[in-house]
Image (cartoon, rainbow, N blue to C red):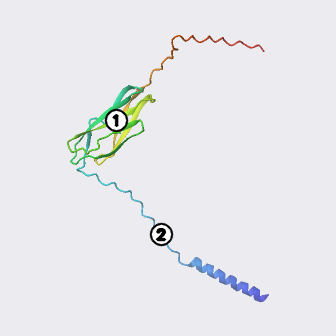
Amino acid sequence: MKKVVFSLLCLSICTLSAVAQDNHSPVAPPPPPAAAAQPVAKPAPDPDAGIFKFKEETHDYGEVPEGPLAETDFEFKNVGKKPISITEAHGSCGCTVPKWPQEPILPGKKGVIHVAYTTQGRPGMIMKEVTINSNAQQSPMVLHIRGTVKPKPVEAVTPPAGTPPPAPVAPPVPVKK
């Protein structure tokens, strides 16, 4: 029994000294803090790139009736030194559809971006945007359309000729309890 106790005592001492050595072992220093993520710098615009000069960047339709398309043309001139190539244009919703020139607009030349707004089923305020992506200095370029769609007048339904008028409805009879 003495041997067993002595053996357990020796085993405990060895285990404790091993644990103590692990606690005193040199600890690796914490890794250096990660370098702060630097924002990716946007490349500087080409100083010779084309430059949009629009007659107007916001078109106000005023009041338009519900139903027909509300259309306008945004005219611009390239006042830069290089041609402008429009790669894409899109409206802020599916009801605003732009059409743009597919060929480059040379310096000193004019171009047109046609915008059609669907008024059918959209009475109320018009506040939409058209975003133009290109190689011009102002890319993306944002154009705006504004206005008010007047709702269609409610038409009174008239019965066809020869149809008898509807039967009068009798007032409800009070029920005695």
Left/right of residue 100 with respect to residue 26 in the rendered view: left
Give the residue drawn at x 59%, y 76%: 23
Q: Amino acid at mark 1?
A: Val
Residue situated in front as seen by the camera: 70 or 128: 70
Quarter where residue 148 is shown: top left
Point out the image quarter for the N terminus. bottom right
- Percent coordinates x, y for residue 19 in the rendering: 62, 78
> Most extreme residue toward the right, as rendered?
1
Residue situated in front as seen by the camera: 153 or 29: 153
Q: Amino acid at mark 2?
A: Pro
Residue annotated with mark 1:
115
Q: Give the label, 1 or 2, closer to the camera.
A: 1
Residue situated in front as seen by the camera: 27 or 142: 142
Give the residue drawn at x 76%, y 89%: 3
Left/right of residue 48 with respect to residue 163 in the rendered view: left
Residue annotated with mark 2:
31
Measured along the vertical axis of the image, is residue 30 above or below residue 100?
Answer: below
- Percent coordinates x, y for residue 164 in the rendering: 57, 10
Measured along the vertical axis of the image, is residue 115 above or below residue 8?
Answer: above
Q: Secondary structure at mark 1?
A: strand
Residue situated in front as seen by the camera: 133 or 1: 133
- Percent coordinates x, y for residue 33 in the rendering: 45, 65
Give the residue drawn at x 76%, y 13%: 176
At label 2, counting other C-alpha atoms closer than 10 Å, the crowd grade (few under 14, some 14-19, many 20 or more) is: few
